[in-house]
Structures are given as C-alpha cells and as structure tokens.
Amino acid sequence: MNHLPEPVRVVRLPDGTHSYADQLPAAYAGPQVVHQHIHQAAPDKTVQRIALGSGVGAGAVVAGVSFGPLLVGALTAIAANIAMLAFLALILAWGVHTVVKSVGGPDAAAAVKNVRKARRKRR
C-alpha cells in the first residue's frame, strides 16, 4: 500500500488543545525581509486601488468596476441609436425631395430651385 498518503499526525499542544502537526507555527528565525515591487496600475484600475487604499470600501470599488464599463456601453448604444435615426431622417428627406420633384408640377420645380438658391447663398 505505497500509493496511499501519509496519515495525518495530530499532536497535543502544551495548553491541552489538539492540532495538526503540519499546521504548527514555525520557530522564530529573526526579522522577516519583505521585497515589495510597486508597479503602476492600469488606467482603469488606478481609481479602484486609490479607493481601497484610502479606506472607501468595497462598495465604491465595485461601483467603479461594474458601472464604468456599463456607462460606456450605454453611451455607445445611445450614440449608435442617434446616428441611426439621423441616417433614417436623411434617407426620408431625400425620398420626400425626390417624390416632390418628380410628381409635382412647375410649382414644385420652382420650389426646389428656390431651396437650392437659398442653400447656395448660406454657404
């Protein structure tokens, strides 16, 4: 039965409690040296790290992380809708112009010419 793991060793501590032998605290070996590398955070995470560092809390961090991209997505969708409506209005105006020009009599042709002249004068 060599393939079985070693049985877990339980030891009794001096205060009378039991503990697993692999979870015992290591002996003190002097001060511990911590190497800390500080890197610049990505632009979208900087605000969240500042919020956590200043103690604002997880709520502000979650709001920044989740609602930031949500806001960008919503504004993009609104801009796309407005662009589509503007394009639709342009197509409809062109259609009305073409129908008025072709169906209308001499008065309609004169109206189209007057509109063209008015546009040229504005430029």
Image (cartoon, rainbow, N blue to C red):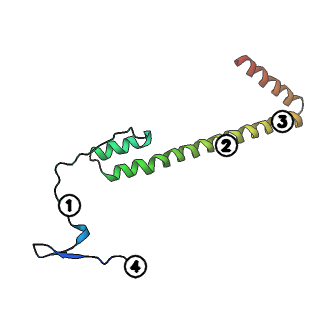
Mark 3 and mark 1: Cα distance apart in space = 89 Å
Rate crowding at label 1 as few (under 14), some (14 to 19) or many (20 or more) other CA atoms within 10 Å.
few
Q: Quadrant of residue 34?
A: top left
Residue at x 20% of width, y 63% of height: 25
Query: Which label sits on residue 98?
Result: 3
Q: Quadrant of residue 92?
A: top right
Name the N-terminal-most of marks 2 and 3.
Answer: 2
The one nearer the camera, 111 or 21, is 21
Q: Identify whether 12 is placed above or below 87.
A: below
Residue at x 37% of width, y 41% of height: 47
Eye-nearest disc, 4 or 3: 4
Q: Residue furthest bottom?
A: 1
Mark 1 and mark 2: Cα distance apart in space = 68 Å
Left or right placement of residue 77 versus residue 99 in this view: left
Badge 3 amino acid: Thr
Residue 77 image position (x, y, % from top left) = 58, 46
Q: Do the residues labelled 4 and 3 touch (CB within 8 Å)?
A: no
Badge 2 amino acid: Met
Q: Quick one: SS at disc 2?
A: helix
Residue at x 31% of width, y 47% of height: 52
Q: Do the residues labelled 3 and 1 touch (CB within 8 Å)?
A: no
Query: Which label sits on residue 2?
Result: 4
Eye-nearest disc, 3 or 1: 1
Mark 2 and mark 3: Cα distance apart in space = 21 Å
Rate crowding at label 3 as few (under 14), some (14 to 19) or many (20 or more) other CA atoms within 10 Å.
few
Residue position marked by numbered label 1 in the rendering? 26
Name the N-terminal-most of marks 3 and 1.
Answer: 1
